[in-house]
Image (cartoon, rainbow, N blue to C red):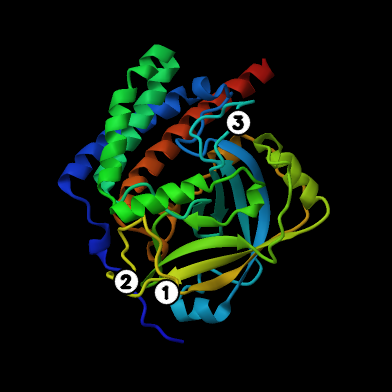
Amino acid sequence: MNKNWLKYNPEMDELYEKTLAILQKAKASTQKFVEVSPELSQSNYFTRGAHAKSYAYVDAYFSPNQELVDALGISDYFHENQKLNIRFSNANNVIEPGKKNFPAYGMSLKFEQVCYPLVNFPLFPTDDAHSFLELFNDLNEARIAQAKSGWDAVKEIPSLLVSGLKAFYHINPLNIGNLIWKGAQMEQDFLMNYAYHGIGCYRFGDYVAKLHTEKKDFELLENENSDNLQKTTLQQILDTQEIQFDLYIQLGIDEETTPVNVLSKEWDQEKAAWQVLGTITIPQQKVIENNYTLENTSYSPFINPKAMQPVGRIQQTRKEIYQISLETRTKLNEKQGERELKLKKE
């Protein structure tokens, strides 16, 4: 098998000093956001900093393409009939019961040693880590203000607009057009009808690749295009059949052809073909009900072994944010669980 693939280099992850400074602000706003999340989402638990709404948790198993796994030297992480857990979610950072959500969905994979949070959009809205953090921080501040009053949230709009424009400023104009075009094509559909994509790149042993999933033997599954029926439809389907997804990886060639830190443009498939890493099978089952344990479960790719970590500057900023969100959510939910248990005993 040809191994002329792009090899990982630590320089791919290096952050500038100005980015490290804004990262601290983003971490602080993430912590504050999680602390007010029950009020924003009208929930009895503290939610995630993104993809707050869970539709379903399901169990699955994985059958790898052994030849490719062996060629990459990652057989320690993928083996036959390996169990995994999958979380389906909406990208909104608050839960808004009864309201129609934009069709931005997540499919997070939790294998025994590695996690891959995937989204149903192949591109990222900026290539600049600093601008991403500014926009992310302003979004958090707007939500935190919303917890106080609607007027406080309105006052955050100017800074949101500025940071949004800055984020787009760092993108090639041709890529902006592609982003807008793909965004306009997003339509409400059953969550299993989408392809799901990793954000940026990952290490696969010594090499760097992107990944995505697609439903195998594709046939549209219907749920009357309603966001509120996602979980119900999923249960109806899993009552009678299993569903399979192929997990693909696209190995980089070189930094010019397949640039790691350009997330606003897809890699050329003719030069870097997608290859099947393996097949995910979701068997017939009862969809797992949400609970504190599941909501505290981490699907962070940053807990992956070193040889399977996310790669790139924007990925490194997300690492710190994931960590503070998980720590805050876990601590507060554990306290909440202890209080409820105490009340039951009383």
- The part of the image, by quadrant, that contains residue 34 is top left
Q: Earlier in the sequence, mark 3 or mark 1?
A: 3
Amino acid marked by disc 1: Ala
Query: Under tag 2, what secondary structure?
Result: loop
- Residue 105 vertical position relative to residue 99 in the rendered view, above or below: below
Question: Residue farthest to the right?
Answer: 240
* CA distance separating discs 3 and 1: 38 Å
Rendered location of residue 127, percent (x, y): 30, 51
Q: Which residue is mark 3?
A: 100
Question: Residue farthest to the bottom?
Answer: 1
Q: Which residue is mark 1?
A: 272
Amino acid marked by disc 2: Thr
* CA distance separating discs 1 and 2: 9 Å
Q: Earlier in the sequence, mark 1 or mark 2?
A: 2
Quarter of the image with the C terminus is top right
Q: Which residue is mark 2?
A: 257
Rendered location of residue 343, percent (x, y): 64, 17
Q: How many marks?
A: 3
Query: Under tag 1, what secondary structure?
Result: loop
